[in-house]
Amino acid sequence: MAEQNTAQKTNAQPHNTEVGVIDAPPHPKAFPPLDPNHFAPQIIWLAITFALLYALMSRVALPRIGEVIEERRDRIQRDIDAAEALKGETERAIRDYEQSLSDARNKASGIAKETHEKLAAETDAKRKESDAAVNATIAAAEDRIAEMKKKALSNVSEIATDTTSAIVAKLIGETVSASEVKKHL
């Protein structure tokens, strides 16, 4: 058996006795993309890929992007036009509002002036009526006063005549007639 083990060992390939290490074939000299022998095919494939990407971008992607940009430009222009139209409507509405507000103020001012004039006329008419009533009352009072004064003066004349007659009668002792006293007064 020992001979067999030795024979097997001689025929067998040497192997690594370290744990975790695997025998592998040796690595090539350089990394293929960096190997100058492979530059020509890489440049050809680069040119083909660039041409395909350029064709794809120019025929598919860029027209779609252009359409989107044009659509956005049109939408923005429509929005600007709509905003300008709304601005014009708003300005017209503001002008109409200010005009109606001005008309309402003028109308209110006219109504206030008319009411003031009407009240002034009514007040003036009532004042004239009151003045006329007061003047009539004053005239009636003046007439009564004049009558009373006249009566009083006529009574004064009689009283003066009677008093004078009485004084003369006491002083002289004779009675004097009222007509004689009136002559001298």
Image (spheres, rainbow, N blue to C red):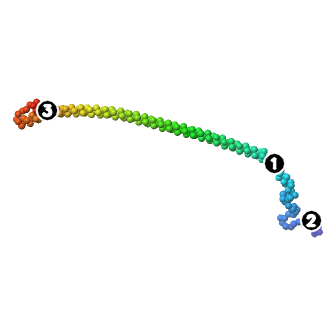
Q: CA distance from mark 2 to mark 3?
A: 190 Å
User: What is the secondary structure assignment of the residue under circle 3?
Assistant: helix
Q: Is residue 179 above or below residue 47?
A: above
Q: Earlier in the sequence, mark 2 or mark 1?
A: 2
Cβ–Cβ below 8 Å for labels 2 and 3?
Answer: no
Q: N-terminal of the two: label 1 or label 3?
A: 1
Residue under label 2, please give it: 12
User: Label for residue 52?
Assistant: 1
**Disc 3 designates what residue?**
158
Question: What amino acid is at disc 2?
Answer: Ala
Front: mark 2 or 3: 3
Q: Quadrant of the C terminus?
A: top left
Question: Where residue 29 sits in the image (x, y, percent)?
Answer: 87, 62
The residue drawn where x is 36% and y is 35% is 123
Q: Position of residue 115 (x, y in %)?
A: 42, 35
Residue placed farthest to the front in the image? 184
Which residue of the protein is positioned furthest toward the top in this rendering? 179
Identify which residue, 154 or 1, lies in the foreground.
154
| Outermost residue to the bottom | 2
Task: Name the residue: 90% across, 66% down.
Answer: 14
> Please, is residue 44 above or below residue 131 in the view?
below
First in sequence: mark 2 vs mark 3? 2
How many neighbours does mark 2 have within 10 angstroms: few (below 14), some (14-19), or many (20 or more)?
A: few
Give, as a three-letter code, the residue at label 3: Glu
